[in-house]
Image (cartoon, coloured by chain):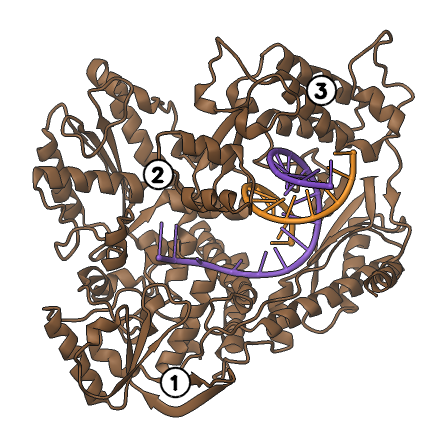
Chain colours: A brown, B purple, C orange
Amino acid sequence: MNTLLYGHDPEECIVDVHQLDECTMRLYTRDAAGVHHRDERFYPFFFLSQRSHLEGFQPRHWIKELEGRAHYRYVCAFESWPALWDAVRFILERHNRTSLTKVDHYASLETISLTPDPVTQYLLQSGKTFFKQMQFSDLHRLQLDIETYSPIPGQFGRASRPGDRIILVALSDNRGWLHLLDGKELTEQQMLATLVELIREKDPDVIEGHNIYEFDLPYILKRCELHQIPFAIGRDGSTPQSPFARGVQERRSIPSVITEVGGRHIIDTLTLVRNYDQSKRNMESHGLKYAAQYFGIVPQNRTYIPSEKISWYWEHDPEPLRRYAMDDVFETRGISEHLSGTYFYLTQMLPMSYSTVLRSGSATKIEHLLLRGYLRQRHSVPRPGEGYQTMGGYTDIFAVGMLEPILHVDIESLYPSIMISKAIRPRSDVLGLFTSLLKELTTLRIQAKRRMMAADDPQEHSRLDATQSSLKILINSFYGYLGYSRGMFNDYASADEVTRSGQEILRQMILSIQSKRGTVIEVDTDGIFFVPSEIVRTEEDERHLVDSLCRELPEGITVALEGRYRKMLSYKKKNYALLDYEGNIRIKGSALTSRSIERFGRNYIRTCVSCLLNGNIAGLHSAYIETRELILNHKLTIRDFAKVESLTDTASEYLQAVEAGKRSRSAAYEIALASDKPLRRGDRVAYYVTGDDPNPRSFDNCKPAAEWDPNFPDENIPYYLRRVDEYSEKFKPFFSARDHHRIFSVDDLFPFSPQEISILDPKLSPNTLSDKEDMNIKTNQ
DNA sequence: AGCTGTGGCAGGGAGG
DNA sequence: CCTCCCTGCCAC
């Protein structure tokens, strides 16, 4: 089983048609009654996107249409290996190809691409790029950034406009090399040719850039095309490719993302930042400048130039622009240094390329591990099961208000621990790889963590930290995979069993804390916030408490003290704020902190929460008054009151849903549709509300944020004042109705005085946990 | 095209 | 007013 984890070398991957005989399958058939029958014979097989590829092919074969498959719709199974080879030759001749090479590993069971793919082939042939036995610091990484010019004032350079061009190419690498190709000295053709030369000469393993997939590379490629210069930067002399540049996408003209080049890896630091923020969720933007500030890697005397002024600077004062470009690549390197190590080490464990590891989700990674095991053992794989998961984590709230002091305990790796200790796994995993993989990875992680603690060398320490955190990501994905509707090995009943056990353990721990005179405040899935009994005074006492909680839980389940806090503001389930002993405040939950709340609202709520946690009643009232004043006097700018929403649907999906009455019109979509830019999935739209109706239908009283003019501010003042009152409503549970009204209202004849106003005692749920459960049972009946 | 899960809160629109 | 439904965002 060990060998499963040391992947990504040629013999572990089904890379080309010569290894096809590693692939076998069982056929499953469904009869009229819907009952599945398993055909006991094994067949050689491959997968096809179109049945027509085999039209006219004589030898006996089965073609079955797959359900729920995106690219490849048919599986073809042959009774014998010679029949398979006949079919392969037949297809090759029909399509005038000399070789078949598969492209991506997700598809390793279902795909033989008819597109020769030198990129992947080269990646797989070049031992260096497997990263086996390599350390992150051994990688030669090169950072690249281009600046573009447009003769039209205030416009960005566009790759396809002949008058526009690339004016600067900034390069750096992790060995300290910095280089600038300058359009004042070189023509664009010369720059592009030199760029190719430089990359080939430097021979990096990895090329990095911020938004390099969707901006720098496509731009460079387009310019190269115009000048008829091959952008042959691959180690095999190939040009960058999109892994999806195959039939279907080309016809639909979906812009393909460039992610692969022969023998090297292309890494977009924008993807790194997005992935990072997906788990942290506290970044304001994913742009290079903000991210560099966020990670504290801004060079001294950093030059900033707004993008619409680039052309002006180039014409009038190019020197700052050169410094700006160099600062960009320097920051790109810093971000990659910070975030890519984890993916690098993951690539050593998964049968995927570096950039695929970066761009794929966690369930895909688990599936690849399982698939590799099945392929090696020449065993058939199941199809995804139908059904749905019915259960999740247990969440509850037992107290609302201000509480102190606070302990936060959490069960370590709850779901993985349950799956290991109860050997919960997909029933379709007949080889039993799921549990052994999970155990193996957990053991490796514990070892890595132990060695990390012991490591003196800071570099060794950070390497081990990256390793263990990448293992953690994998380990935590096993549970999600069970309930994944498209997972070949999914098993909803097993997923329910995991969550059911989790709920049971958490309830047990709540009772345990209550029996020790602790006041439980809020619980969520695997963690509990509570006020310990008064006899728990020292940190020593706290440790004892945690130890005794641990002893009362089942074997294999451990509890850790996750944090200790001075005060907690408990608002609703999954919504609370914490004040630690250093005076820092952490706010959690979509009701209190959310991107969909306007910035002024977030600031206002944060100020109020801070005042509450610090017992500053006067501060609440002045925050209310000041926020109102800002709105009334047009002191806010568009960045403060614009609402930013992201769009999940395409234009046609939205319009259809509205037409069908399935959803109502929404301001964000209407704004996006009205603009001249095409609406894309995931676009973020910033808009504000206009008019003077405090309760407007926002979709016909809204304007794009970009159209707001500070000289003629037309934001809807009554509406935004109403928002302040709505936000103030959130603090109702903390005061008597009278006090709340006094704090959150404008001064009348008598000026506001915080005297005699006090924060209410917390409202404890009158019932114990067991009462609550009784109630639930009653209401269910 | 890609694609781990459930639970929970808030806001907006539509219709009573 | 209220309720229902939908979406977006967030916690874990």
Counting from the top left corner in percent of width and height, residue B10 is at: 68, 37
At 49% from the left edge and 43% from the top edge, which residue is drawn? Answer: A659
Q: Nearer the viewer, residue A55 or A736?
A: A55
| Residue at disc 1, secondary structure | strand
For the residues labelled 1 and 3, the Cα–Cα distance comes to 68 Å
Q: Which mark is residue A623?
A: 3
**What is the x, y in percent for residue A678?**
35, 36
The quadrant the N terminus of chain A occupies is: bottom left
User: Disc 3: which chain?
Assistant: A
Q: CA distance from mark 2 to mark 1?
A: 50 Å
The residue tagged 2 is A332
- Disc 1: CA contacts within 10 A as few (<14), some (14-19) or many (>=20): some
Q: Nearer the viewer, mark 2 or mark 3?
A: 3
**Are both tags, 2 and 3, on one chain?**
yes
| Quadrant where the C terminus of chain A is found in the figure | bottom right
Which element is circle 3 on? helix
Q: Nearer the viewer, mark 2 or mark 1?
A: 1
